[in-house]
Image: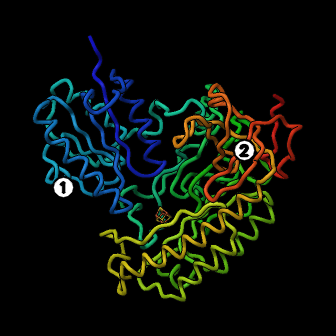
Amino acid sequence: MNKPRFHIVTFGCQMNRHDSEHIAGALREAGLEPAGDLDDARVIVYNTCCVREHAEERFYGQLSQLAGLKRVRPEVVIAVTGCVAENDGEQVFRRAPHVDLVVGTEAAAGLARLVESRIAGEGGRLCTRDASPDDLADAPSLRESPVHGWISIMTGCDNFCSYCIVPYVRGREKSRSMDRILAQAEEMAAEGVIDVTLLGQNVNSYGRDLSGELRFAELLQRLDTVGIDRIRFTTSHPKDLSSKTIGAIAASSHVCHHIHLPVQAGSSAVLARMNRHYTKEEYLQLIADVRRAIPDVALSTDVMVGFPGETERDFSDTLDVVHESRFDQVFTFMYSKRIGTPAADMPDQIAQETKQDRFRRLMESVKAGALRANEAYAGRAVDVLVEGPSSKDPSRLTGRTRTNKLVHFTASPALRHTVVPVTITAARTWFLEGRLSPRSDSVPMPRQDAATWEG
Ligand code: SF4
């Protein structure tokens, strides 16, 4: 007999993609198989994001289109999990009566069991947001890639930035046991995973809620010896990036010299209203400290324009910080109201045209900075972990450096999922171009990207 098939649609951040891999693993353990597409699926799971209004509306738009499918095939089980499920609860049924299961973020570990019972014809429509005794991150995982993996080291957030809905939908900070994280990393190393990203809303505060003194710096030190070549982490809150953690990154062999350090805004007054707990000067000092300790570091950040009350002068502070920090990559956003957060009720909301104008000016500065940062790679040799054919030009391969730079080059598709040396021949704003080369052919990057392949 054919096994029932499932299809998962994932919105939002890497944490959601990681959760989807574990939901997929749990569904497979429950006897289901992945489906090629929606039409082939007996079970459809939406793993949702409500951090931005746009993602939420896109999800509801897609969900409404399933009403017709449910009429034709009433046996199909439709489940909604993730942040929208947590935030909206029963309201999901009001907007989409064809949904069978609404499962909150902390209840997601029980999703596979609920699906199993619906397939068996047991139980009716259900909304649950009760925390499961199990941890979704402990469920088996069906990874998207054989060489990339994610490990959740903590969930939730205690920071309550005034624009952010995450602490309300993901709960308070909860660190996973270090032994469990190390065991998962060892399993991945044995399976041939090359690149692992440690996930948490604020990884720098890892361990604060556990007994004992072990913290994020110790976790990095221990992971450095498990046999994984590239260890990354995201996201870091600047107020919690300790000198001990910076030292651990600098001293490690396998923790990539890339730190994502969201600044959000350059104005100290705006940062105070955002409840970020650092000033412009403190942030710039932190960047200087990081660069002193890790000279080859690549830095990325998030920047938001149009926060309530942001003046032209505040915005010019943001441009200052972007310029002075010499970021390799900047993820840019326009502030959008999230109902239920303090910022949604703040006076002086910024007009859309002003936000768009500032966004455009920010992008000009970001583009110039990104190109400058990429030009430093010209003529250098870097190790590239090949992801596969480029989506824009399938005759070329695409991959990433240890510092997370995207590189396009021409070589055999057989190199997919291997690490190869590439000499950078041209720098573009958003990527690098290169050619495959033996080590002797190129000038090593004066950083950990230096090629090691002898080919
Ligand atoms: S640190 Fe701030 S922005 Fe990040 S998840 Fe927590 S509340 Fe949201």
Measured as percent of width and height from the top left, residue 409 is found at 67, 40
Q: Nearer the viewer, mark 2 or mark 1?
A: 2
Comparing 173 with 144, the one in front is 144
| Depicted 42 relative to depicted 401: above or below | above
Q: How many marks?
A: 2
Q: How far apart, in angstroms, are the residues tagged by discs 2 and 1?
A: 51 Å
- Judging by the rendered image, the residue that carries numbered circle 1 is 91
Occupied quadrant, residue 258: bottom right
Measured as percent of width and height from the top left, residue 316 is found at 57, 84
Q: Residue at x 47, y 42 (%)?
A: 18
Disc 1 secondary structure class: helix
How does the figure colour the protein chain or chains? rainbow
Q: Residue furthest right?
A: 440
The answer to whether 120 appears left or right of 13 in the picture is left
Residue type of the residue flagged with mark 2: Gly
Q: Quadrant of the C terminus?
A: top right
